[in-house]
Image (cartoon, rainbow, N blue to C red):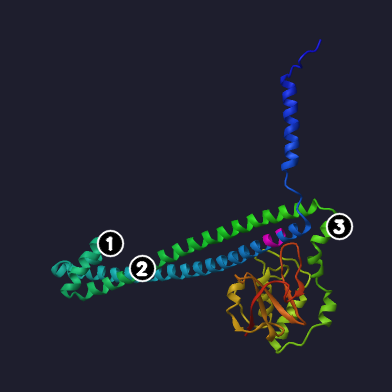
Amino acid sequence: MYRKPIRTAATTLTLAGAASALGGVALADPQPSTAEVRDRVDALHHEAEVATEEFNAATEAAAAARRELDRLTEEAARRTDELNRARDALGSQASAEYRAAGLPASVQLALSSDPDEFLGRAAQLDRSGDRQARALLGVQDRLRDVERLRAEAEEQATALEEAERAARDQRERVESRLAEAERLLATLSAGERAAALAEERSAAPRAAGDAAAALPAAPGRRAAQAVAFAYAQLGKPYGWGATGPDAYDCSGLTQAAWRAAGVSLPRTSYSQADAGTRVSRDALRPGDLVFYYPGLSHVGMYVGDGQIVHASRPGAPVRLAPVDSMPLVAAVRPG
C-alpha cells in the first residue's frame, strides 16, 4: 500500500540548506579579473597618496602653529613682566605719597586685583587725564592683545592637530584597503598575479650603475646635483611621510633632491607646484618637477630621455618610470 512520505523537520532543514547552498553559488560575486584587481590597487594607491600629502601638510602647518604659539607665549610673559614692574614702581611711590596726602587714584588703580575694576577705573582716569593711568592702561591693552592672539594660535593648533589626525585616519583606512587588495592578489594564480603586476615590473628601476651611466646632461649645476641625488636613491623603499635618507614618499624625495642642490622646496606636492617656473611638457629638462592627477597629489623628477625618478607607492622602491605613465597635469622648474 502506498504511503504518503512524511517530511520531518530534519528533512526540511536539509532541503533548505541545499537550496541555500545552491542559491549561494548562484548569487556569489564572480572572481575579479586581473585587470579589475590592478585597477582596484591603482585606485587605492592614489587615495593613499592624497591622504599622505594631506598628512604632510597638516604636520608641517601644526609645527608652524606651535612655533607661533611659543612666540606669542613668550611675548605675553614679557608684557606681563612690564606691567608688574610698572605696578611695583607705583607701589613704591605709594608709600611716599600716602604719607603726604594719601594714595593717588593712579596708585590705587595699580594696586587693584580685579581686572574688570582695573579696566573700568583706568578708563575713567584716562578721561580725567591721569598720565600714569594712561600708561598702565596701554600696557594692559597690549597684554590683552597678546592673550587674544595666543588664544587664536591655540585654536589654530587644535584645528591643525585635528586635521593631522583626520589625515592619519584616512591613511590608515587606505592602508587597510591596500592590504585587502594584496590579499586578493594572493588568491590569483601565478600567471594571473604576474599579469596584474606586469605594469609594476616594467617600471622597475635599472641598477644604480646603469642609471648613472645613462645620466643625461642637466641644464645647470644645481639641476645636475638634484638629478644625481635622485638617481642615487633608486631602489630605496617608499615610506609614509618619509624624507630620507632611508625611505621617501613622493614629495619627500623631490624635496630632498633639491635640498642637496641648495634649493629649499615646500613639503607637499601641491605646494611644490608653486615653487618654480611652470614649463610645458615639451620643454622639460632634467631636474624639472612633474605633477600628476588633478589634485597634484603625486610628484616626480624628470631626468631626461622621457623618464622620471619617483617614489611611487608602498611596496615599490624609488624607481624610473616613463614621464607619461600617469596623467601629467603640470611641470615646474625649481630655483
Q: Amino acid at mark 2?
A: Thr
Residue 80, labelled with which disc? 2
Residue furthest to the bottom in view is 220
Q: Position of residue 221 (x, y in %)?
A: 71, 88
Q: Residues within 10 Å of mark 1 (few under 14, many from 20)?
A: few
Residue 97 quadrant: bottom left
Q: Position of residue 226 (x, y in %)?
A: 71, 81
Identify the secondary structure beneath mark 2. helix
SS assignment for the magenta stretch, majority:
helix
Give the label, 3 or 1, closer to the camera.
3
Q: Is residue 291 left or right of residue 304?
A: left
Q: Is residue 103 left or right of residue 191?
A: left
| Front one among 239 and 83 | 239
Q: Amino acid at mark 3?
A: Gly
| Residue 124 visible in the current orientation | yes
Q: Amino acid at mark 1?
A: Pro
Residue matched to label 3: 191
Identify the secondary structure beneath mark 3. helix
Count the marks. Answer: 3
| Front one among 72 and 297 | 297
What residue lies at 40% left-to-right and 64% top-to-bottom? 151
Residue furthest to the front in view is 1
Identify the secondary structure beneath mark 1. helix
Residue matched to label 1: 115
Part of the protein shown in magenta: 40-44
What residue lies at 80% left-to-right and 12% top-to-bottom? 2
Q: Mark 1 and mark 2: span between their CA atoms?
A: 13 Å
